């Protein structure tokens, strides 16, 4: 019996606890429940969601799958599509997976072990009153929520502290397509890949890493960020890159612009540090680029091939919202910029390149900016390509070096202008023909010409009556200003007859140190201007200025030599009612202006000056009544060499209305009248009565020596072999008589332009052609004599060419002393 019992005990095997029937039943119940939840989650969720969506006019696609897997604590959404009004797709999700580790909730942690969203489409519409995202008006929802809140409850309820820590090892987005309609302005955002890693966040600390690759309006955008905060303090480090964003997407936001296009790029690397008291930005490097920019306002356009702006080591500090520190370096380059009106051929201005090199700026107690060099290359102003006219101005380079700017001063070491060329063309209406004028300027000009300015009495404002002028503490200083290389300014006036032409060559223009600083206001600023006009006139002026001293002082010394009076006769004849046929002007100037008091003198030397009847082109025209007294007075003042020298003292106050320099005509006449006593007249004119009479009858004054005329063939300009004997004798005479000056006056005939002689010419265009031929003969003759005989240009004076319409007339050059 004992043995049998033992055998039964040894053969019985005890089953594990989890194979116990109650445990199995519980497990099967949970598994079944989980399977049921997983199975019915999709139809149940759609059943619950569909009515809610219907209230918004939205419809969920039939193949949408929304499932919850309780085994993995994962929510999966597949093939979800929302339609607005059953037609317009506003949201689609190909795949969404969110997995939460529930076990960590016991440790106050929300762990999202998986978050993956792929192939999404989202539509956003924004108007002035609505913000509709995926078919839902967000503004309306917020308004509805506010309307149901208790209006009596005014006290705010403090939010409960969030005691959980959010842990997200990796959150992934890919192929997210967002269409945005912002007040009828379309934008497209495509997120190729967005990964957020190492997310740990609670009420005390937050950290995360973000990597984004996206496309905005067809433009690549990448962003890498690292966030780390503790107790509200920390830093955000980011790297951002935008490549060729189309600027025309922004045009509709600026209604005043008629055109806006081009491409914008940005690359930057920066860190933002935040504490309770300060916000610091450290921009390690950044580069901003604009390409192919076109900006239009009404009919005015600005174009720019390329803009490049770089920053490095930029540091900004804000303490309690106020800027306390700023420092950094940078540079700016603009390439091929221009502006035009209506069409590219109507160019207002342009330049090849603008560069600001080595910019450094900082702010401690006050902001300060330093620029090592600022240059603009190949500047052009006002060019009308359709009219094939020269631009008003070109400049090879404008440069400013060593610039320092702060709130108290502007200091510049050097300003240089290299190769300034300017051409001003006046048409017959006295309008600058090579100036591109805007319509507004044309209208203002017409109104100004039609309506004379009204005479108004000066109004004395209260501010004008104050005697105490506030002191200007802003200091401006310049160390040097100069023109370099060839600088030419030319002027052509077609509104007068003959056409006036003048070319000014500036060989030297220099200004010394200039400053309004208190300790430098009495410092003299030297200046120098040296140049030439046309071929032979030349000038040189030197002096100094003290514009900021208590009494401004200006000193000018210099001269103007070999100015042909014939070239200015066009402007003088209207006022004088006579023509300056030939002659040359030399001046010596010595002037000083202190405050309003002027002191100095001007020496005027007129060489070989002869006058005739205004607007008379025929050789031998009779003088009118107005020219005779001046010719007589002029003859009284001529010395034995035929010169008139006037020493004009200048003095007085510039504020005196009577102050001014009388015209040369008035000075000559007044001095002649003072000299013209009865005895002087008898002594001067009786021995030469026949000559004076002859001169008065032909509109010319007496000549001491008369040369034979130098004959020309019709249309001939240059000296030929038949004229060599005359030329050689003339050169020998000029070399023998060193003080002799000769007037050169060309006479043209109608045959020079193939015209038949039918009487006195009246056609102004034909007269102009003949006079131009005469001018060419005079210039060719003078240059030939200078070159072959080494005769000083100042001894050969050009006169206004004449026309001889007589039947037997021959082209010639008349020479006289």
Image (cartoon, grey):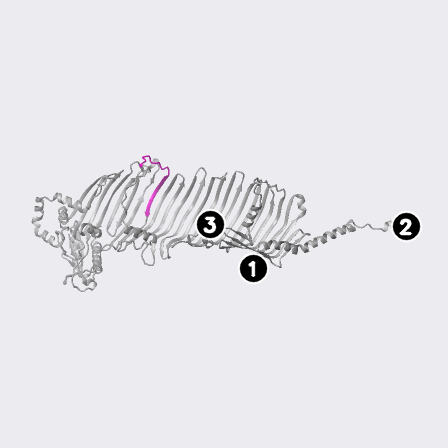
Q: In the image, is 249 to the left or to the right of 112?
A: left
Image marks 2 and 1: residues in contact by CB distance under 8 Å: no
Question: Circle 2 sits in a helix, a strand or a loop, which is it?
Answer: helix
Q: What residue would you read off at disc 2?
A: 4
Q: Position of residue 367 (x, y in %)?
A: 43, 40
**Looking at the image, can residue 367 be seen?**
yes
Question: Circle 1 sits in a helix, a strand or a loop, which is it?
Answer: loop
User: Which quarter of the figure has residue 720?
Assistant: bottom left
Mark pair 2, 1: CA separation: 85 Å
Image marks 3 and 2: residues in contact by CB distance under 8 Å: no
Q: Position of residue 279 (x, y in %)?
A: 51, 41
Q: Report if residue 474 lies within the magenta region.
A: yes
Q: Residues within 10 Å of mark 2 (few under 14, many from 20)?
A: few
Q: Position of residue 618 (x, y in %)?
A: 16, 57
Q: Position of residue 787 (x, y in %)?
A: 22, 55
Image marks 1 and 3: residues in contact by CB distance under 8 Å: no
Q: In the image, is 304 to the left or to the right of 556?
A: right
Residues rendered magenta in the picture: 465-483
Q: Earlier in the sequence, mark 1 or mark 3?
A: 1
- Residue 346's disc number: none
Mark nearest the camera among 2 and 1 is 1
Q: Earlier in the sequence, mark 2 or mark 1?
A: 2
- Residue 87's disc number: 1
Mark nearest the camera among 1 and 3 is 1
Question: Circle 3 sits in a helix, a strand or a loop, which is it?
Answer: strand
Q: Residues within 10 Å of mark 3 (few under 14, many from 20)?
A: some
- Residue 288's disc number: 3
Q: In the image, is 88 to the left or to the right of 747?
A: right
User: Which quarter of the figure has residue 749?
Assistant: bottom left
């Amino acid at each position: 019996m004992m043995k049998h019992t033992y055998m039964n005990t040894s053969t019985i095997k005890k089953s594990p606890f989890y194979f116990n029937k109650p445990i199995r039943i519980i497990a099967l119940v949970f598994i079944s429940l989980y399977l049921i939840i997983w199975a019915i989650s999709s139809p149940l969720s759609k059943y619950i969601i569909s009515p809610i969506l219907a209230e918004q006019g939205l419809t969920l696609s039939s193949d949408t799958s929304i499932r919850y897997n309780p085994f993995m604590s994962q929510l999966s959404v597949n093939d979800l599509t929302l339609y607005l009004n059953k037609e317009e797709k506003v949201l689609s999700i190909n795949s969404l997976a969110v997995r939460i580790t529930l076990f960590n909730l016991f440790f106050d942690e929300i762990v999202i072990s998986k978050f993956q969203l792929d192939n999404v489409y989202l539509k956003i519409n924004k108007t002035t009153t609505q913000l509709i995202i995926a078919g839902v008006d967000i503004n309306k929802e917020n308004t509805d929520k506010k309307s149901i809140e208790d209006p009596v409850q005014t006290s705010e309820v403090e939010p409960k502290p969030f005691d959980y820590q959010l842990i997200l090892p990796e959150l992934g987005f890919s192929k997210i397509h967002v269409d945005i309609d912002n007040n009828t302005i379309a934008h497209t955002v495509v997120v190729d890949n967005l990964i957020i890693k190492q997310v740990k966040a609670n009420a005390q600390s937050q950290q995360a890493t973000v990597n984004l690759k996206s496309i905005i309006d067809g433009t690549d955008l990448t962003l890498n960020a690292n966030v780390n905060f503790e107790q509200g303090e920390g830093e955000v480090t980011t790297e951002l890159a935008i490549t060729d964003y189309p600027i025309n997407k922004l045009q509709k936001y600026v209604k005043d612009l008629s055109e806006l296009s081009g491409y914008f790029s940005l690359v930057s690397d920066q860190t933002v540090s935040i504490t309770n008291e300060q916000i610091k930005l450290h921009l390690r490097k950044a580069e901003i680029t604009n390409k192919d920019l076109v900006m239009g306002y009404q009919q005015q356009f600005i174009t720019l091939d390329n803009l490049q702006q770089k920053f490095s080591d930029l540091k900004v500090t804000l303490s309690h919202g106020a800027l306390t520190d700023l420092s950094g370096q940078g540079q700016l380059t603009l390439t091929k910029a221009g502006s035009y009106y209506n069409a590219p051929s109507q160019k207002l201005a342009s330049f090849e390149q603008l560069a600001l090199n080595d910019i450094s700026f900082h702010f401690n107690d006050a902001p300060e900016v330093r620029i090592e060099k600022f240059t603009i290359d190949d500047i052009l102003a006002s060019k009308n390509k359709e009219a094939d006219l020269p631009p008003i101005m070109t400049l090879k380079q404008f440069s400013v070096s060593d610039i320092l700017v702060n709130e108290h001063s502007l200091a510049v070491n050097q300003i240089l202008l290299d190769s300034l060329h300017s051409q001003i063309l006046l048409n017959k209406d006295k309008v600058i023909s090579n100036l591109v004028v805007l319509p507004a300027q044309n209208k203002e000009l017409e109104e100004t010409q039609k309506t004379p300015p009204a005479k108004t009495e000066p109004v004395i404002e209260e501010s004008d009556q104050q005697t105490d002028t506030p002191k200007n503490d802003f200091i401006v200083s310049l160390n040097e200003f100069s023109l370099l290389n060839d600088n030419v300014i030319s002027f052509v006036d077609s509104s007068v007859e003959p056409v006036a032409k003048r070319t000014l060559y500036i060989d030297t223009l220099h200004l010394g140190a200039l400053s309004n600083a208190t300790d430098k206001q009495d410092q003299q600023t030297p200046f120098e201007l040296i140049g030439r006009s046309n071929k032979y006139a030349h000038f040189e002026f030197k002096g100094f200025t003290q514009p900021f001293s208590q009494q401004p002082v200006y000193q000018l010394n210099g001269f103007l030599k070999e100015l042909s009076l014939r070239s200015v006769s066009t402007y003088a004849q209207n006022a004088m009612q006579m023509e300056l046929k030939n002659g040359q002007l030399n001046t010596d100037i010595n002037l000083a202006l202190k405050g309003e008091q002027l002191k100095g003198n001007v020496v005027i030397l007129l060489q070989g000056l002869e006058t005739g009847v205004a607007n008379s082109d025929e050789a031998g025209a009779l003088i009118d009544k107005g020219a005779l007294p001046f010719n007589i007075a002029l003859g009284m003042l001529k010395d034995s060499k035929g010169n008139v020298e006037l020493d004009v003292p200048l003095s007085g106050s510039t504020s005196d209305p009577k102050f001014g320099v009388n015209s040369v005509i008035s000075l000559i006449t007044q001095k002649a009248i003072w000299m013209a006593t009865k005895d002087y007249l008898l002594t001067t004119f009786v021995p030469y009565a026949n000559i004076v009479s002859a001169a008065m009858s032909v509109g010319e004054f007496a000549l001491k020596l008369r040369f034979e005329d130098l004959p020309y063939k019709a249309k001939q300009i240059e000296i030929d072999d038949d004229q060599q004997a005359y030329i050689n004798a003339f050169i020998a005479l000029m070399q023998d008589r060193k003080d002799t000056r000769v007037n050169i006056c060309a006479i043209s005939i109608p045959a020079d332009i193939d015209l038949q002689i039918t009487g006195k010419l009246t056609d102004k265009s034909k007269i102009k052609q003949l006079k131009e031929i005469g001018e060419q003969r005079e210039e060719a003759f003078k240059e030939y004599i200078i070159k072959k005989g080494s005769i000083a240009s100042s001894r050969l004076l050009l006169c206004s060419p004449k026309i001889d319409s007589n039947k037997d007339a021959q082209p010639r050059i008349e020479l006289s002393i």
